[in-house]
Amino acid sequence: MTSILIVDDDARLLFLIASVLKTHSYEVVGAKSASEAKNLLLNGNFDIVIVDWMMPNETGIDFIKSIRNSATYISNIPVIMLTAVDNIDSKIVGFESGVDDYVVKPFETRELVVRIKALLNRTQKESVDEIIKFEDCEFSQKTDELTMNGELIYLSTTELILLKTLCSKPNQPFSRAELAKKLSFQVSDRTIDVQITRLRKKIGDNSKNPRIIKTVRYIGYALNVI
């Protein structure tokens, strides 16, 4: 399920947007400040961020600049800016800061839904074409092929699903529960741990001191891509 983070100190607007998006089967989480949003981003798994330009303490522009400079997955997360200012100079400032799209207030919620779909389609299509590189390995998100030093590495269905999930957002931690949900059958945390150990072995990663698939304490696992 697509997960969306809404950052807006206007509780009424936040509730309205969240209510509409949930009817379109989006998972929605709200934050009333930039600091709260950053904490949620670093500890969650979001596909898109919707942020209001005018917020107290840290504006939407400052917030976007800070996440674009992050060393984690959030640096590439798609962002839609909500703003009451509709002029070219302001839009240029936003785009230069890392905004992907704008929705000018007041707006129809159906316009926001269309823009979300269009942005997700564009960014997800771009990510499918990417080759994820780590150590001596390359994983194609388009063909689902893993190679090490140019040689094809066989993966079981479970291993492939886990690797695809980790590669979908490099450097971002996934909980064991999130990884388990990606599988078509119910598994325990222990099963996830065993499959990760097997996957590490196939990509030449030392389970006692992993460099590629990192164990994130109290959370789960993350693919370490520099």
Image: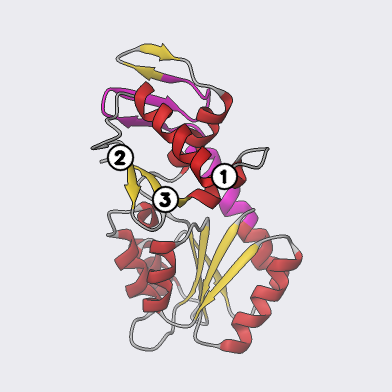
Comes first in the chain, label 2 or label 3 = 3
Q: Is residue 94 above or below residue 145?
A: below
Between circles 2 and 3, the one closer to the viewer is 3
Q: CA distance from mark 2 to mark 3?
A: 16 Å
Q: Which residue in the structure is indicated by mark 3?
A: 220
Q: Amino acid at mark 2?
A: Val
The one nearer the camera, 192 or 158, is 192
Q: Amino acid at mark 1?
A: Ser
Whole-percent x, y for residue 23 in the image: 76, 66
Estimate the x, y position of residue 30 in percent, counting from the top left. 54, 75
Magenta stretch, residue numbers: 117-146
Identify which residue is drawn at 31% across, 41% down.
Answer: 224
Say which residue label 1 marks: 188
The residue positioned farthest toward the top in the image shown: 151
Most extreme residue toward the right is 23
Residue underneath mark 2? 225
Local SS, label 3? strand
Taking the spot 71% from the left edge, 75% from the top edge, the residue there is 19
* Classed neighbour count for the residue bearing mark 3: other residues with Cα under 10 Å, few (<14), some (14–19), many (≥20): some
